[in-house]
Amino acid sequence: MEIGRLIERTEECHRRIALEYYNHFSGQQDQLNVVSILGEYPELYARETLDGILSAAPGESADERLLRFLRADFSGNYVQDQIKGMAEELANAEGAATVTLGEQSWPYRAMPVIIANEADYDRRGELEAAYLAEMDRLNPLRRRIFGKLAQTMGELGYPSQIEYCEKLQGMRIRPLAEQMRRFLDETDELFSSRLHHYASIAGLAGRELRSCDLGFILRARQYDGMFASDDMVPSLARTLRGMGIDLDNQKNVHIDLEDRPRKSPRAFCVSIRAPQDVRIVLKPHGGQDDFSTLFHEAGHMQFSAHMNPELSVLYRHSGDTSVHESYAFLLQHLVSNPVWWKEIMREDPGDYPAFARFHRLYFLRRYGAKLLYEIEFHERGGGEELAERYSEHLTRANVVSYPRERYLADFDRNFYVLQYLQAWIWEVQLRRHLESSFGESWFSNRRAGDFLRELWNDGQKYDVWEIAQRLGYEGLDISQVQQEITA
Ligand SMILES: [Zn+2]
């Protein structure tokens, strides 16, 4: 099949699936019916299409870069096709699952938020146990998915998903793992002391800390008063206005804040079609978390909404997701920036920025440990004994004992964990560049907005390493984020 036609069909298929995800995870449609949509595009998933693309040479319809994207995309399609039935079964089972404690029941997917908001120590533990039991019930299905994935990697000629991601997507997995190992060693003491400090603020002094307490500690209700729900979207609009973006009149974006019982508590941004139709789904539950989540998703949204519509769909919807995440974190971290507080909120944030640094330290350590665990999982073939290793890696990073039941659910396929880590590292370097070019209130400078819009225009055509080099850096360097969050 001709490459131009395959790209057109890719865009159409993407649009329909993105809409299906939006409808299901925003709680407006019970069933997720991805499989039936994919059934209408068999040529995008066929082995012979993939073989054709793998053996294609650069030419008129695709240069070397586009061909690289096509190889990664169509390999991904093929892999996805192998597990699509089981993946949909899992999504629907999770969507329908409920967790019951005593007289009360909740949707399974709502549990992380319910547990994080439960102030009673004993009840929090009981909720967590009920949640983990339900999670464990679906682990056999998750195991089957991972087994099929490993088998498909072999069939495509890769020893594991590590080599698949490194060779096809240009990920630098093992070098980053080395940086994270060092980072964990160097921040053990600091993290432990800050964790106990914030635990005692949360009323947990002297209590044994469990994994379910982390969400409660990080929920940090003491800051809720600083974040008025009715100012959430207006404060975002004020911020964007400074960069020359008029949120109220942006026709290609939509923010869905409506409360629906089956709405996923995990916020997300979905590009039905970038840049023409980009949506955010968020289920507000109050406090600082809502603000930073909204700003995070707004970073994704503005990036997608400013992509050049002429770009190939592959550069708009595929590529290095660290680029996407770095713009999300660039906006998210404004919410804990004292200069932003002064200019946009006209208030003093007190010790909230220090708490936000602890929060970021926690996430960097958690994802660093997840990266080390996920590498080990793939290297060792992902048997059930990896549950113990998961618990060991995460317990070490979080300093509280971590349940084994999560070893398959707390897992991002295709090393998404690396994309987050790279984005956290790169966001600080990008922000330093903005500060030195446009001053510390760069977010109120229209020229900084122009600069970002110029980067956004390229979509994900360039990976985060290429962008770093374009802005004069040698590459990604963890020392800047480490310096910032350990200050
Ligand atoms: Zn994100």
Image (cartoon, rainbow, N blue to C red):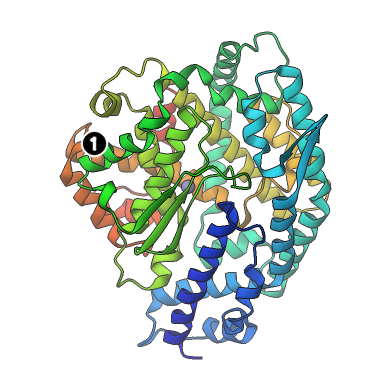
Count of numbered badges drawn on the protein: 1
Q: Decide which of 336, 463 is in the foreground and name it.
A: 336
Mark 1: which secondary structure?
A: helix
Q: Position of residue 6 (x, y in %)?
A: 48, 83
Residue labelled with disc 1: 435
Q: Residue at x 81, y 44 (%)?
A: 136
Q: Nearer the viewer, residue 299 or 77?
A: 299
- Residue 53 image offset from top left, x and y in percent: 52, 83
Would you say residue 472 is visible in this rendering?
A: no
Instruction: Check the image and report above or below for 408 versus 71.
Output: above
Identify which amino acid the numbered label 1 is placed on: Glu
Displayed quadrant of residue 124: top right
Where does residue 449 sit, x and y in percent of width and height?
A: 22, 47
Quadrant containing the C terminus in the rendered view: top left
Instruction: Evaluate whether residue 144 shows in this view.
Output: yes
Front position in the image: 389 or 43: 43
Check the image and report above or below for 267 versus 391: below
Residue shown at the point (50%, 36%) measured from the top left: 284
| 336 to 371, vertically: above or below | above
Mark 1 crowd level (few <14, some 14–19, many ≥20, 10 Å Cα): some
Residue 463, how many percent across, how many down?
40, 59
Q: As drawn, which residue projects farthest toward the bottom?
A: 1
Q: Is residue 257 above or below residue 167?
A: above
What residue is at 52 percent from the left and 74 percent from the top?
13
Identify the residue at the far top of this view: 206
Q: Residue visible at 83% across and 47% down?
A: 137
Q: Left of 70 or right of it: where is 353?
A: left
Is ligand 1 within 8 Å of the beta carbon of the residue shown at mark 1? no
Query: In this rendering, would 113 be left or right of 232?
Result: right
Residue 339: quarter of image: top left
